[in-house]
Image (tube, rainbow, N blue to C red):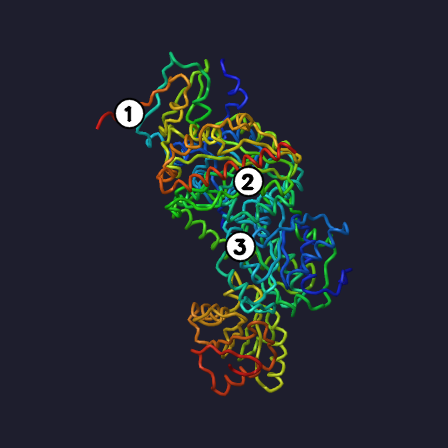
């Protein structure tokens, strides 16, 4: 059925701004940082035009941006913030505070390398640092995914059985400042998908006074963290359900948490996250033209890690090649470790190869992926090694 | 039923539960009781790391009978901003937001957030619980520790002056600033009431004696707070619409009618070393700090 | 389906237990001297005072930590601090 839609040409950042406003977010607290700034600018511009009824708190730091979002959320408002890199690290303790307070804050993170030296380009080290906090974390591939995932993020975060903050990350400049066509549902469609914010239960309510965060026993603290585990594991089913509902609404496929490209019969599976997925799919096409059965998986949901879906999609492959835009120093690629964890839980014997690409904004091209598959096929790779692959060369 | 007028005024409902874990003779616990009496049930407390993080109680029993949100050390003013914006969106203009932060959280680690919230003019009452050091972690010096005071990080007495936060807050051009101590509870109560009746960002700075940190007997909390005021080391004042006003008894001290500063210092172990001959210079410098504050007050009142 | 656990506590007295056990001296009201001014009630850091019908103070010994502020501040010496456990 043909539906009337809004279709704009938007950067990833503008897509994030529209998504937050279309979600009828009530309070936005943010601080400028490249490459996030244009999200806040756009939100402010659209509010000042009178198009949206959203309160903007122009705070004096990222620490206060997350703090104000936490305060608004604790008082029952739908709250949003956006940041990147050092801004994310400056608000880091509040990231944990939001998760441990069980507040459904939604944030947009524009991935950017950490200094020194000063560098505004994309890698994923900043967002990987949130891995263990209790945030639900998505890595979007393009502006359309940024938009779609933020709308879904509010519904997931506010679910009564989840109540965890959700972050949607996208790559600096490659997504944040690159214009693409973005299709958006009409407001009434979004309103039918996402309930109005009044349903959010305020923690701070004079009619029902409680203290949030008083001293626990060690056992109480343990059980609170364990409850976040239970809820984030359960959230996989909520994320799938919300994704299916959103698919229903838009026709775009969000039933999958790890979108797959030509993996059904693939012997060699490339795993990426974020914007480089498009280049990986180009590489898959080239490799298939060469007669090599390659496929690609994009880790769109980073936490909770969609273990079952990953296993379903790699079980029949010969080898997995994981391309990480961030490294755990002294261990290896961050996502490689996740994939190896899943493989070992199932006692599978599929070899997993570890590549570090794109740090500090280095361009990742299809040639990198093609070279990696070629070297694997010709027996040149050692599974115990971490390969630093830049511009088609190991360095 | 008989009740003295002051009891009637303060009201007998306690929103600060007994059996809390504050130290014997805790000064700020007295202050909190009266703040809560003035603010009433429709109040949300926002509190960063500090003594009150403990005094607030456990996961089983909360000391405060109003909604209470613990925040990271530097975050309280910004969390307050978020809460008030959320309340305003829901039309809850009957609910007060009070940030209650120690001197460490106010003078030092949380200062940027305080300044930011004041500059934005958010409709909250920020109260500095000034006990003049990081008492909860074991008496380390803060920007609010007075010159000469012993702490566990200034063993020979702090060399630097107490940061003049009142004047810093005045330069933020906020509608209401006041000081208080628990020794003058009606003054404190009235200031909280007045602050909460004014829209915008309000700043109340309360000097709260701390028996373990100030090295005083637990029975002397109110005595030492009175002496702080009577010696002129602490000045009860209000600053409203650009006008400064002294409150009793500070308003009687303009013409040097102050008791000697030594009366205030000598009952406190933290100033004991100031009375050794080799530290006379430090005592003189501390006296000079206080005289200069009074000179500035006189100038302000003459305007 | 998990039930979300919030890190919240409901108000109740005694978050530190019966803090009366912290006490080694207890305040005793000398009713004959008391002028019912209310200062002991006002200056108590532990919410451990109540006033009876006639306005005389009642110490809540479950909670009173025995700091001695009330005795020190009483303008007519109507509160005596008495050792809780006797000599030695």
| Residue B212 shows in the view | no
The 10 Å Cα crowd at callout 3, few under 14, some 14 to 19, many 20 or more, is: many
Quarter of the figure with residue B191: top right
Q: Position of residue A64 (x, y in %)?
A: 58, 51
Say which of marks 1 and 3 sits in front. Answer: 1
Relative to C61, is A252 above or below?
below
Q: Are marks 3 and 2 in contact (CB under 8 Å)?
A: no
- Identify the residue shown where x is 67% and y is 38%: B91
The answer to whether tags 1 and 3 share a subunit is no
| Residue A94 shows in the view | yes
Residue beneath disc 3: A95
Residue beneath disc 2: B99
Whether residue B214 sits left or right of residue A2 in the image: it is left
The answer to whether tags 1 and 2 share a subunit is no
Q: Are marks 1 and 2 in contact (CB under 8 Å)?
A: no
Disc 1 from disc 3: Cα separation? 51 Å
Secondary structure, mark 2, is strand
Secondary structure, mark 3, is helix
Disc 1 from disc 2: Cα separation? 39 Å
The 10 Å Cα crowd at callout 1, few under 14, some 14 to 19, many 20 or more, is: few
Quarter of the figure with residue A149: bottom right
Q: Chain of mark 3?
A: A
Say which of marks 3 and 2 sits in front. Answer: 2
Residue beneath disc 1: C83
Q: Which mark is residue B294?
A: none
């Amino acid at each position: 059925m043909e539906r009337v839609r809004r279709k704009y040409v938007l950067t990833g950042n503008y897509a994030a701004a529209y998504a937050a406003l279309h979600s009828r977010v009530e309070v936005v607290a943010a601080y400028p940082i490249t490459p996030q700034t244009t999200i806040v600018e756009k939100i402010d511009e659209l509010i000042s035009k009178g198009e949206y009824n959203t309160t903007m708190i122009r705070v004096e730091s990222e620490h206060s941006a997350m703090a104000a979002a936490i305060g608004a959320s604790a008082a029952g408002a739908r709250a949003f913030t956006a940041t990147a890199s050092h801004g994310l690290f400056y608000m880091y303790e509040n990231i944990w505070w939001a998760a441990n307070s069980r507040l459904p804050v939604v944030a947009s993170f524009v991935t950017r390398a950490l200094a020194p030296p000063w560098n505004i380009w994309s890698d994923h080290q900043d967002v990987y640092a949130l891995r263990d906090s209790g945030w639900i974390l998505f890595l979007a591939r393009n502006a359309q995914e940024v938009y779609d995932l933020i709308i879904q993020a509010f519904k997931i975060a506010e679910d009564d059985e989840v109540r965890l903050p959700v972050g949607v990350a996208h790559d600096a400049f490659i997504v944040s400042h690159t214009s693409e066509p973005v299709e958006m549902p009409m407001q009434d469609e979004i309103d039918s998908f996402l309930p109005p914010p009044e349903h959010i239960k305020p923690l701070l309510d004079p009619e029902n006074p409680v203290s949030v965060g008083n001293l626990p026993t060690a056992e109480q603290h343990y059980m609170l963290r364990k409850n976040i585990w239970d809820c984030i594991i359960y959230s996989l089913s909520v994320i799938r359900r919300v994704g299916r509902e959103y698919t229903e609404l838009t026709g775009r496929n969000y039933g999958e948490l790890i979108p797959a490209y030509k993996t059904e019969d693939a012997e060699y599976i490339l795993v990426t996250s974020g914007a480089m997925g498009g280049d990986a799919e180009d590489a898959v096409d080239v490799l298939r033209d060469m007669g090599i059965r390659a496929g690609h998986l994009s880790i769109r949901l980073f936490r909770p890690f969609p273990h079952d879906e990953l296993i379903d999609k790699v079980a029949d492959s010969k080898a997995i090649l994981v391309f990480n835009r961030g490294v755990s120093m002294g261990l290896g690629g961050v996502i490689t470790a996740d994939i190896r964890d899943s493989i070992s839980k199932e006692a599978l014997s599929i070899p997993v190869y570890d590549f570090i690409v794109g740090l500090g904004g280095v361009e990742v091209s299809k040639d990198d992926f093609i070279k990696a598959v070629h070297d694997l096929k010709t027996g040149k790779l050692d599974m115990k090694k971490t390969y630093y692959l830049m511009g088609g060369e190991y360095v | 039923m008989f009740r003295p007028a002051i009891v009637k005024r303060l009201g007998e409902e306690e929103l600060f539960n007994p059996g809390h874990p504050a130290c014997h003779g805790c000064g700020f616990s007295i202050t909190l009781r009266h703040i809560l009496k003035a603010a009433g049930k429709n109040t949300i407390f926002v509190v960063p790391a500090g003594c009150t993080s403990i005094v607030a109680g456990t996961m089983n029993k909360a000391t405060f009978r109003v909604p209470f949100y613990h925040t990271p050390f530097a975050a309280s003013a910004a969390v307050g901003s978020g809460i008030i914006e959320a309340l305003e969106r829901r039309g809850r203009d009957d609910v007060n937001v009070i940030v209650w932060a120690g001197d460490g959280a106010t003078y030092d680690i949380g200062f940027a957030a305080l300044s930011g919230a004041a500059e934005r003019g958010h409709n909250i009452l920020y109260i500095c619980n000034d006990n003049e050091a990081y008492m909860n972690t074991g008496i380390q010096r803060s920007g609010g520790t007075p010159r000469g005071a012993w702490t566990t990080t200034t063993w020979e007495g702090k060399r630097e002056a107490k940061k003049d936060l009142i004047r810093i807050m005045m330069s933020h051009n906020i509608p209401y600033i006041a000081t208080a101590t628990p020794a003058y509870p009606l003054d404190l109560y009235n200031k909280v009431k007045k602050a909460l009746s004014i829209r915008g960002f309000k700043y109340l700075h309360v000097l709260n004696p701390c028996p373990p940190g100030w090295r005083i007997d637990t029975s002397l909390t109110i005595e030492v707070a009175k002496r702080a005021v009577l010696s002129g080391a602490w000045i009860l004042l209000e600053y409203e619409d650009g006008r400064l006003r002294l409150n009793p008894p500070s308003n009687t001290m303009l013409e040097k009618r102050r008791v000697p500063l030594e009366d205030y210092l000598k009952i406190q172990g933290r100033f004991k070393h100031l009375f050794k001959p080799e530290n006379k210079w430090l005592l003189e410098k501390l006296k000079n700090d206080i005289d200069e504050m009074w000179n500035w007050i006189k100038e302000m009142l003459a305007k | 389906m998990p039930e979300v656990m919030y890190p919240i506590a409901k108000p109740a007295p005694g978050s530190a237990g019966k803090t009366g056990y912290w006490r080694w001296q207890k305040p005793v009201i000398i009713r004959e001297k008391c002028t019912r001014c209310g200062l002991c009630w006002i200056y108590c850091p532990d919410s451990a005072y109540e006033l009876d019908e006639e306005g005389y103070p009642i110490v809540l010994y479950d909670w009173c930590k025995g700091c001695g502020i009330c005795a020190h501040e009483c303008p007519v010496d109507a509160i005596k601090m008495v050792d809780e456990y006797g000599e030695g």
